[in-house]
Image (tube, rainbow, N blue to C red):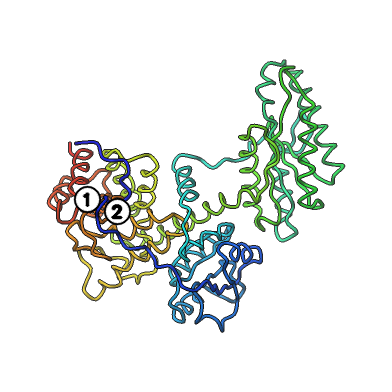
Amino acid sequence: MAEADTALMEPDAGASAAPEVSEPLAAHLVVSYWLAEAARSRLAASGALTVVDDDARLAEAGLVVVSTRVPAGASASFVGELRGKVSCPIVAIVHPGGEDVAVEFLAAGASGLVAEGNEESVAALLGGESDETRLLANYELSLDRLANGVRGVGDRDLVTGLRGPADLAARLARGTGAPMPRLAFVRIVGLEESMRRLSVDARDLLRRRLALQIDEMCRSKAAEVFSTGPAEFAVVSEALSLAEFEDLGASLIEVTAGFSPDRSRLLAMAFGHAGPEATSYVETLRELALRGMELAAEQPNQGVFGAERLALTLAASTELDSAMRAITIVEARDAYPVSHGERVSQHSVAIAEAMGISERDLTKIRLAARLHDIGKVGLSDEAAATNVEKVSSELQTEYASHAERGAEILRAPAGDEVAAAVRSHHENWDGSGFPDGLVADSIPMAARIVAVADALDRWSVNGSAPDRPTPEALQRVNEGSETLFDPAVVEACNDVFET
């Protein structure tokens, strides 16, 4: 078949425009519940918003935001009660560790999902543009990357004499329920490469002298040092302020620059750190500091990299994890075998690749396909466990709402194109689908592809989940060409799956 235009995520020129996922809200008054002060400040600054925590102003609100930092005695049913009082969107603001609460909020009627640190995305729900790049980038990484961990060298580094990863873990565990310490992960950039040119004794001497300098500097500033790898360390302090901790990092960088083991270049240090301003969870503290070290090491001049610069990266991870947990709940109740979304995602990518769609748009299609049923999270058990062919007239309205609901949930964190694909994945080529009755090229291309991939999996399963679509499913897809499905997508489907 002819190679397709790579700008396939947009409706064809001249076609009637697809409806907006959501209408801009008239009022910029936001009523909030349980937001941390930092989150309130970021939200207020994100779009010249007025943020109040006054129940009496609910009727005026253009938006309601509810933090997952639920106080003792409260529950997710609070969101359901709010849904009965307001017609405007209700957005869950998810803190790291609050993903399960976020799923409960979605099931109770919340219409959007935004992570702490990413409050500027709320502006997208008030008529501004959404930034799709963070969640997409995080999703791309999650497809082919194992989580990075700290490389262990035992409880005590025999060369440097410093305590190791086990002692670091015990030290950080003491921060649980107590004042959160500051943590930095440190990498000596170029050290391992330089040491390969040295004898064993010379390597040990270099590491011992470098560790001694770092340890003395940290001790003088009320900080502790741990060895976490041949060229990596961790620094912990409860006594230092943020500015003092960053000054310590700058001093350690100067100390490191005094070493030149191969006489060709000076060593450099990457210092990634996080503290109580960023999180109250030890595991999140470690993740932020590790990511900071990795990002600092990638910079041309290395240096100090703080958690505030990582807020959006963490936000994307929190949003993606919340969405994936919601899909797990949906698929546990669905009429199809578990991992339906993953199979639809795989089929969608294979079809899109055959159509010549660009790499960046492939990621959007993959994400939309993986999460296309997320709107079912709030449906009744009966509606969620049915399928489009067998849905009863009594359940049709509730079942059909999942496409719009899914788009609402995903628009802020994933962007307009992913949300539009989710909204329109039940539209039919001849205009007989839902929720908007779009016809032919007015249906976003991503939605047309997901529609075919979704049907392939639904029509292939019969109590089991086959690796490939069945011949019967392919035949039904071909029979639906030009009525249910875009003929060009069906042609690509045949190219991929016909044997």
Q: Amino acid at mark 1?
A: Ser
What percent of the width, then of the height, locates residue 484?
18, 56
Q: Position of residue 67 (x, y in %)?
A: 56, 67
What mark, if any, has residue 460 been given in the picture?
1
- Regarding residue 218, the answer to whether it shows in the image is yes
Which quadrant holds residue 281?
bottom right
Q: Earlier in the sequence, mark 1 or mark 2?
A: 2
Q: Is residue 321 left or right of residue 311?
A: left
Residue for badge 2: 444
Report, in whole angstroms, how far the alpha carbon at label 1 lies from the one at label 2: 25 Å
Q: Is residue 495 shown above or below 415?
A: above
356 versus 173 height, above or below = above
Q: Nearer the viewer, residue 143 or 5?
A: 5
Residue at 65% in and 49% down: 307
Q: Is residue 333 left or right of residue 288?
A: left
Q: Position of residue 327 (x, y in %)?
A: 40, 58
Which residue type carries mark 2? Pro
Q: Residue at x 20, y 66 (%)?
A: 390
For mark 1, does the 10 Å Cα neighbourhood hold few (<14), some (14 to 19), or many (20 or more) residues? many
